[in-house]
Amino acid sequence: MAATEDLQELTQKLQKLSEEEFKEEDTNVFLVTCQKCLEEEQLEVLLDVIKDEKNQILIRNVGWNLIGPIAKCMQSCAVGSEKERGCLQLLNALIESCNPKEILLGILEQIDEAAGDHISRIILPFLQPLQIVLLKLGNKKSYSVGLSLSTIHSRLSNLPVPYTAQQMQEDKYSLCQCCLALVQFAQPFIDIVSQSIDLSKEADTEEMRKELLTFCFSCLKYPLLNAPLNTLPEDEGDHPLRVFAKQIMGFLVSLGESLPRTFVQRGHSAPTNDTEGSISGNEVCSVESLACLSYLLFVQHIGIDSFPFVFGPSFLVKSNMGHVAVLLKRTEESLLSKGLDLLEHSLLRVDNGSLPEDVLEVLTANQVLQDLVKVMTLCPIEHLRKKSLATLQLVIDKFCVEGKYKLFRCLLKISSHAGVEGYIIHNIKNQIDAALKTNPQNKWFLGTRLTPLLLSALSLSEGAETDLLQMSDRIMASLNLLRYLVIKDDDNETGVWSELAKIEQDFLKPLHTGLNMSRAHYDAEIRSTHEKKRGSHSGKPLCTVTAGGNKLPDMTPEMQLQVLQSALFTFDLMESVLARVEELIEVKLKSAPEGKIGSS
């Protein structure tokens, strides 16, 4: 009990001194003694000392220095324990006696220094005392409110966002709990602004509005951008991060923020790293925040009641292109998923075949298409690859005829992936088929307008040197397209007969040559492998083989032979279809009345 006795003796001595007579060594001894009381858990004794009227001069001068030791004491006790309640009583007593600005800085210092598991352990109990301090600051508190919110948000942003339902339920780092507590912390300041927004334009109110908007947009970027926000089954209700999203969107509306104006602020601009811009005048937020805002509005329908639908479906697609581009350029599963969902929901508002071609002129549209192809072909997450393919088909379905034509030309230029190019060529065939059957006046998929697209589809990028195995998906789609045209287009409506000589020169002849070269190469590889197998003394020697331009892992001769035989099977299939196409061309040319086929 020595610490309490020392404290009593010391305070009696200091009570007799005026403020000017305090010496630094005396106050240092006082603080050390108080810290010993905390270590010995003599919290009630310390509370009495802080509340004692005779000690108020001393407490006003040095009391804020006790915040650090109190925070340390709080970290060593269980949440909700008697000891924690005692620490909070000490903190509230200091708030009553000390300069609010000094207490504010003392609390923020503790929050700013928190790390790891201690972040939420410090923030949660300190939020209410911090709120009390800020409310005591009077009319000039906007800067302090902004500083507090940014400090808290900065520390929270070091915590991982829970992604699965189990992670949210466990809330290992108490992020969900902190988010909900943070809303309660900010509410009085939101009320101050919202209640005076139409009554006055005081500088401090406007400044606080800016600080609060900055905080809301920061929360959209973290944690909401990475958070799973889909609804849970009806009987379970909303999970904490979805509740937080609703409250942040409600704050934006309460602060007088125009959601439609904010939404279109960057919809047509190209995303750049760390780009920031002006929202509603002076408020600053990132493109990631705006992308999350759009996702909440149009996918989760959070805040949609405050978004009057004055925009047409096509305009929404155009405006959302910039937001989708921001999300699809990332690699995190949660962000890619949000980007695909936002693009899908934007398109679902549009009738099939009605999206105008000028959507492709939006600055970010080309980037969205490129990123969509990247997700489709490079993303390691299977369900996202499948989702991106379905979304690409949705994009195709929504465009008008001219839009589809320009989209196909764009995709054939940017995809650099045989599977995607094959998929596009298959869609081109479908559009030609529809034009031949139902719309002979279609000027984009019939006649001379079709020719550039047709020649692009019926070509080999490297001529006879093209890697046929790697490009097999595209080549098979091209052959199927040509076979279809030869069978169906007797009247040369597509111009295929007019361009036959060029198609033969740029596609059929190089393909013949390429197949002969490839077959000879793989036949030689097979013979070499057989020879190695016969001449080997080892049980299972390792060989190296290259297929489709890619070096495969070391394998036994038996495995190598399987790969080589598979390649030859692909060439056989390709050669079979090629022969059939050439046979059909020959039959059509011989059987057609003179001058009919080949004229347009």
Image (spheres, helix red, strand yellow):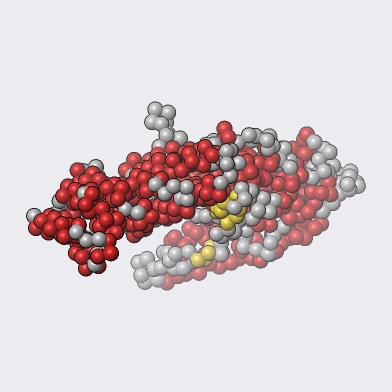
Quadrant assignment, res 557: bottom left
Say whether residue 344 is visible: no
Quarter of the image with the N terminus is bottom left
Residue toward you, 188 or 491? 188
Q: Residue at x 19, y 51 (%)?
A: 49
**Residue situated furthest top in the rendering:** 235
Report the side of 34 relative to 194 (left or right). left
**Residue 13 place in picture, x, y as percent:** 16, 60
Residue toward you, 35 or 586? 35
**Residue situated furthest left in the rendering:** 1
Report the side of 162 relative to 260 (left or right). left
Q: Is 154 situated above or below 440?
A: below
Residue toward you, 482 or 132? 132
Report the side of 329 relative to 453 (left or right). left
Say whether residue 148 is visible: yes
Q: Residue at x 42, y 49 (%)?
A: 137
**Residue 130 place in picture, x, y as percent:** 36, 48
**Residue 413 place in picture, x, y as percent:** 68, 57
**Residue situated furthest right in the rendering:** 595
Q: Residue at x 79, y 45 (%)?
A: 444
Report the side of 34 relative to 61 (left or right). left
Q: Is 195 situated above or below 87?
A: above
**Residue 398 place in picture, x, y as percent:** 68, 39
Residue toward you, 236 or 376? 236
Quadrant assignment, res 128: top left
Count the numbered circles shown: 0
Q: Residue at x 60, y 55 (%)?
A: 277
